[in-house]
């Protein structure tokens, strides 16, 4: 055999070896990609379960107990397992395949819950390298984080206490003004205990349901909607600043003179862009802070000179939220509060099917946001008493408390925001101080 023949034989051997390696790498790539896809789905399930479980650490009407109670943890575990198993993991819901598991633990700290999701999947082409099957896991940790006594993360909305105009005279140019002498009623208890007793007097099922298609309540308005009870559905809207005492109208607030800790590049002023930034300012630990000690007399807050309808709606709802749900928000703000179903979803995953009444974002059984809903929709705002409106020509309001709200909906009519009360902090009746008591406002968030 000559040299050339031997050389051709060697090339053939090397080619065969290289071909096997290339096929192996291709097979490995396919299976690794499949495993990444499974893990992505498991992570989504873990996130949803952790958020749902943490929601039990916020007591709804009729619920008692704390994070450390065995009963509360059992309910949180059941809620986490339920929500973690609702979505598909590669075309099959979690807990429907042999070996699937959802493991829930409470060893991460107070008001925290850890959810681990697992599935064993078969491999297709790389069994020789990785084995016949592979166990894929993902986990998430969520907490019901308490807002401290020093309120630092306020949205720039000055919202009036719920009140009823009982003797409005349409022929009176000033009929929109709140006037207690004419019989207008402000529903505001003397202290936190009275508020809790009032709210607990309602049935847990006595909650107004919402329909995204009609942009209106789909059940008769609950009596609780006249009170600052958890689950209360309130219409709050920007209007003519001269008519801000019209029922439900809120003031746009100017925080430019009191913010601290703003990151570099943020232009602090009284204009629309900074106002929008403060609405979306959810990362207050590294973003701008409005530090107010609720144990001390509350300071007056400056009001924006305009009604800020456009900036308000743009900051709350993104452009693609308009159709087919008839929402607004232009130009698009991809970091707006209602952008997406969940915090870690891409905007393209935002779909009308998530907003059908049969799959609404609010969990009426526990009177709290569903665990899969973005926490960007939770805000804290100052509350003022319409018994003490700003004097004529004043550009300040006097807050009496702070309320945690969850944004249910938004419409373009006067920048109307429909929101549900989560809790009240620093409750009191009028005056400059927060009054006695004070509930802790909590927000549900992923921490790992």
Image (cartoon, rainbow, N blue to C red):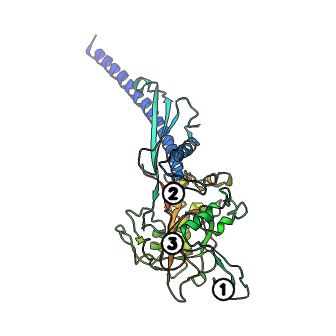
> In the image, is 233 to the left or to the right of 98?
right
Provide residue 441's location: percent of width, then percent of height.
50, 62
The span from disc 3 to disc 1 (Cα, nearest Å) is 24 Å
User: Circle 2 is placed at which residue position?
Assistant: 375
Question: Looking at the image, which is closer to me, 304 or 233?
Answer: 233
The furthest residue to the top: 1
The span from disc 1 to disc 2 (Cα, nearest Å) is 41 Å
User: Circle 3 is placed at which residue position?
Assistant: 401
Check disc 3 and report its element: helix, strand or loop.
strand
> In the image, is 264 to the left or to the right of 323?
left
Rendered image quadrant of residue 409: bottom right
Question: Looking at the image, which is closer to me, 376 or 7?
Answer: 376
Check disc 1 and report its element: helix, strand or loop.
helix
User: Circle 1 is placed at which residue position?
Assistant: 181
Disc 1 versus disc 2: nearer the observer: 1
The furthest residue to the left: 3
Q: Residue at x 68, y 51 (%)?
A: 358
Rendered image quadrant of residue 373: bottom right
Provide residue 315's location: percent of width, then percent of height.
52, 67
Give the mark nearest the N terminus, 1 or 2.
1
Circle 1 Cα neighbour tier, 10 Å, few/some/many (<14 / 14–19 / ≥20) = few
């Amino acid at each position: 055999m000559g040299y050339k023949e031997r050389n051709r034989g060697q090339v053939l051997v090397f080619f065969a070896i290289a071909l096997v390696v290339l096929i192996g790498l291709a097979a490995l790539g396919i299976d690794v990609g499949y495993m990444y896809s499974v893990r992505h789905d498991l992570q989504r399930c873990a996130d949803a379960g952790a958020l749902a479980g943490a929601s039990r650490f916020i007591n709804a009407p009729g619920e008692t107990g704390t994070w450390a109670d065995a009963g509360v943890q059992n309910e949180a575990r059941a809620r986490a397992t339920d929500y973690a198993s609702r979505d598909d993991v590669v075309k099959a819901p979690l807990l429907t395949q042999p070996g699937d598991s959802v493991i829930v633990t409470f060893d991460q700290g107070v008001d925290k819950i850890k959810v681990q999701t697992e599935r064993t999947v078969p491999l297709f082409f790389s069994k020789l390298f990785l084995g016949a099957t592979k166990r894929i896991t993902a986990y998430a940790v969520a907490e019901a984080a308490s807002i401290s006594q020093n309120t630092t993360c306020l949205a720039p909305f000055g919202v009036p206490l719920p009140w009823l105009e009982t003797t409005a005279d349409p022929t009176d140019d000033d009929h929109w003004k709140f006037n207690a002498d004419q019989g207008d009623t402000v529903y505001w208890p003397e202290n936190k205990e009275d508020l809790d007793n009032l709210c607990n007097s309602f049935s847990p099922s006595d909650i107004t349901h919402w329909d995204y298609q009609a942009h209106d309540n789909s059940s008769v308005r609950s009596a609780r909607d006249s009170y600052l009870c958890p689950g209360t559905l309130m219409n709050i809207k920007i209007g003519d600043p001269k008519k801000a005492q019209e029922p439900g109208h809120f003031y746009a607030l100017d925080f430019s003179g009191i913010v601290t800790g703003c990151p570099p590049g943020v232009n602090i002023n009284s204009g629309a862009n900074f106002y929008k930034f403060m609405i979306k300012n959810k990362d207050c630990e590294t973003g701008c802070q409005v530090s107010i000690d609720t144990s001390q007399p509350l300071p007056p807050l400056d009001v924006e000179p305009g009604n800020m309808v456009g900036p308000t709606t743009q900051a709350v709802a993104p452009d693609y939220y308009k159709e087919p749900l008839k929402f607004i928000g232009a130009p698009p703000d991809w970091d707006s509060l209602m952008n997406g179903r969940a915090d870690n979803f891409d905007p393209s995953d935002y779909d009308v099917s998530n907003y059908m009444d049969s799959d609404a974002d609010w969990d009426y059984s526990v009177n709290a946001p569903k665990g899969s809903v973005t926490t960007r929709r939770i805000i804290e705002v100052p509350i003022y008493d319409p018994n003490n409106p700003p004097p004529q020509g004043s550009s300040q309001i006097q807050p009496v408390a702070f309320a945690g709200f969850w944004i249910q909906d938004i419409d373009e009519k006067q920048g109307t925001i429909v929101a549900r009360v989560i809790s009240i902090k620093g409750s009191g009746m009028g005056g400059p101080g927060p009054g006695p008591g004070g509930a802790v406002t909590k927000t549900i968030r992923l921490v790992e």
